[in-house]
Amino acid sequence: MASFICETAAQLFSRIEQNKCYIPLEEHLLPQLTTQDVVEIAGGPGSGKTELLYHLIVHCILPDTPWKGLDLEGLNKKVMLINNDLHFNLFRLMKILERRLRYLLVANNISVNITDISTFINERLKLLDILKCTNCDEFICSLKYLELAQNQKYVLMIDGIMSFYWSSKMRMSYPTAKIPDSMCVVISLLKNIIKNCNLPVIITKRNLVSSPSYDRSLLPAAWRNLVTKKLELVFEGCNEKSSNITVLNISSGVKVRCAISNSGFKICY
């Protein structure tokens, strides 16, 4: 006969808290990020959502031990990126990584030949896997694959969670179509992935309409309950060298001034 373990609500919450670990991933924007967090990066077109993803990916894949005497402040974590928006550019990521290394090497008066830099970048990129999706079915299949890959530990990033929202709604509107709400399926799969991987999930979401309140009403309550941290990116204009962005932490109300240039995403202290 099967045996059951009973626990009180207090014991349950205590066990969940014990499974949480803090991840020091860009703490100026994401303070006290834990392995159970779901981060939503929202904003309009051109607000820098994908650029912020590049920035976070670099933090994740850089080593947590010194390289050539440099402390690169990386996490040495695998990243699984699902590219729905098709805005993600691997060459851009490589350039950001290369420029960051060159800047640190020059600042610390360290000489490294170009072959060593290229080899290092190639080794770091082995920690990044990219899945490209062009429709909702491919996106859901990708999540189902990740749900089954329980032995893989990675930070999951999704660029464009709402990319297939309207096409899915149109497909569901046909009288003969008996198709479940794709967003509900996505939420269910993400919950299982978070539980299995025990690492944070970071998602970009393009605002579907100009009104934030109406935009929120388009999403099911289950999605709003799933998201634990939310950043809102606002484009503030540009100059000759960079674009200016304001990042608002919805939970704390803290605003952080940032800039995007050829060298990538930068926080303006």
Image (cartoon, grey):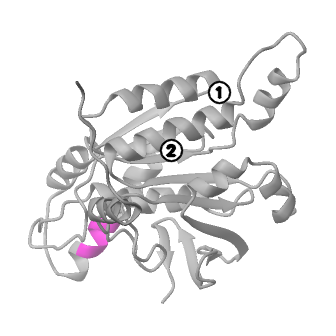
Q: Give residue 34's quadrant in the image.
A: bottom left
Give the amino acid type for the residue marked by disc 1 in the picture.
Answer: Cys
Residue 136 drawn above or below residue 98: above
Q: Amino acid at mark 2?
A: Asn
State the residue lying farthest toward the top. 176
Q: Position of residue 258 (x, y in %)?
A: 56, 78
Residue span colored magenta: 100-104
Q: Is residue 126 above or below residue 111?
A: above
CA gap between label 1 and label 2 equals 21 Å
Q: Residue furthest right?
A: 175
Describe residue 177's horizontal placement relative to residue 11 as left or right.
Answer: right
Nearer to me, 60 or 33: 33
Q: Is residue 177 magenta?
A: no
Q: Is residue 195 left or right of residue 43?
A: left
Residue 98 shows in the view = no
Q: Kindly state the secondary structure of the residue where label 2 is placed.
A: loop
Which mark identifies residue 98?
none
Residue placed at 47% from the left, 51% from the top? 92
**Residue picked out by circle 1:** 136
The numbered disc on residue 89 is 2
Of residues 45 and 182, which is closer to you in this image? 182
